[in-house]
């Protein structure tokens, strides 16, 4: 039997994926949001230092223990972004939430309750591929994920790994990004949230490890961008 654990389901892509997969699957959602009412959603803040005595962590263990015989796909979706007035503490939080605390929790579950993991799913924007990005710490956190992708791929071949590098999907965060909205070329590229969710779920359920670019044209636009920045 197969199940899913999704980090970050309060809004946007994570919420859409959670709601879709939950229709026919066991899905455990982790969120720092307070307004979630599903029995399989647990409040867990990735901004806090990891602590085995944390009540929310105990609730996660209790819930997952109900599904000991399941093989789980872990979806790392939690992310925050750089702001112009970030302090050192804010920059540390970006790295913790976007990478370190997600990986630490996953490793803890794998060892503590021998969580049977079949797939690891990582998400990044195309900022990770840019040589020059204003989202410096977001970019660094995603580079760390890409590094982890290759490390796990080489060390645990039984676990399939998929890395999605996504561009321009019309989430709430994207719509707030005025720089993207002013770009005429990007406005012409299809990036509907529901279409993206359907594509991602279809790819998640295929076998094999791979890096997936969506929309594909962003891959080539990024190459042009970096050439022009040289």
Image (cartoon, helix red, strand yellow):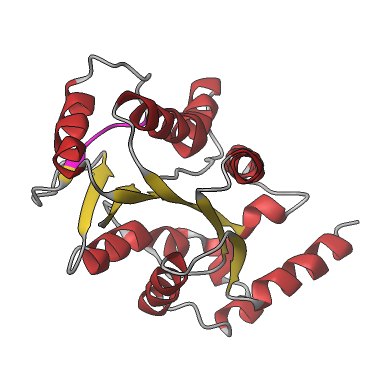
For residue 13, which quarter of the picture? bottom left
Residue 108: x and y in percent read 38, 26
**Residue at (46%, 62%) from the top-left corner?**
174
Residue 16: x and y in percent read 29, 65
Q: Quadrant of the N terminus?
A: bottom left
**Residue at (58%, 75%) from the top-left corner?**
215
For the record, the magenta segment spans 42-46
Q: Main secondary structure of the magenta part?
A: loop
For residue 14, which quarter of the picture? bottom left
Query: How many marks overall?
Result: 0
**Residue at (66%, 45%) from the top-left corner?**
150
Q: Is residue 123 visible?
A: no
Against 53, residue 21 (above or below) is: below
Q: Nearer the viewer, residue 128 or 182?
A: 128
Against 200, residue 106 (above or below) is: above
Q: Nearer the viewer, residue 32 or 132?
A: 32
The reply, left or right, for residue 183 in relation to residue 14 is right
Residue 226: x and y in percent read 82, 60
């Amino acid at each position: 039997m197969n199940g899913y654990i999704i980090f970050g389901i309060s809004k946007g892509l994570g919420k859409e994926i959670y709601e879709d997969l939950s229709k026919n699957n066991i899905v455990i959602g982790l969120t720092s949001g307070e307004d979630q009412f599903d029995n399989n959603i647990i409040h867990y803040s990735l901004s806090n230092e990891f602590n085995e005595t944390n009540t929310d962590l105990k609730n996660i263990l209790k819930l997952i223990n109900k599904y000991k015989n399941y093989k789980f796909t872990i979806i790392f979706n939690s992310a925050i972004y750089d702001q112009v007035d970030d302090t050192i503490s804010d920059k540390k939080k970006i790295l913790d939430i976007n990478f370190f605390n997600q990986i630490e929790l996953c490793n803890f579950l794998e060892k503590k309750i021998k969580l049977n993991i079949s797939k690891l799913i990582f998400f990044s924007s195309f900022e990770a591929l840019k040589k020059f990005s204003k989202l410096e710490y977001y970019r660094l956190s995603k580079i760390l994920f890409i590094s982890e992708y290759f490390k796990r791929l080489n060390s645990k071949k039984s676990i399939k790994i998929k890395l999605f590098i996504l561009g321009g999907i019309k989430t709430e965060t994207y719509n707030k990004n005025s720089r993207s909205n002013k770009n005429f070329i990007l406005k012409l590229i299809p990036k509907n949230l529901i279409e993206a969710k359907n594509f991602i779920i279809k790819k998640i359920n295929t076998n094999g490890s791979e890096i997936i670019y969506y929309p594909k044209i962003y891959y080539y636009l990024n190459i042009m961008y970096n050439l022009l920045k040289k």
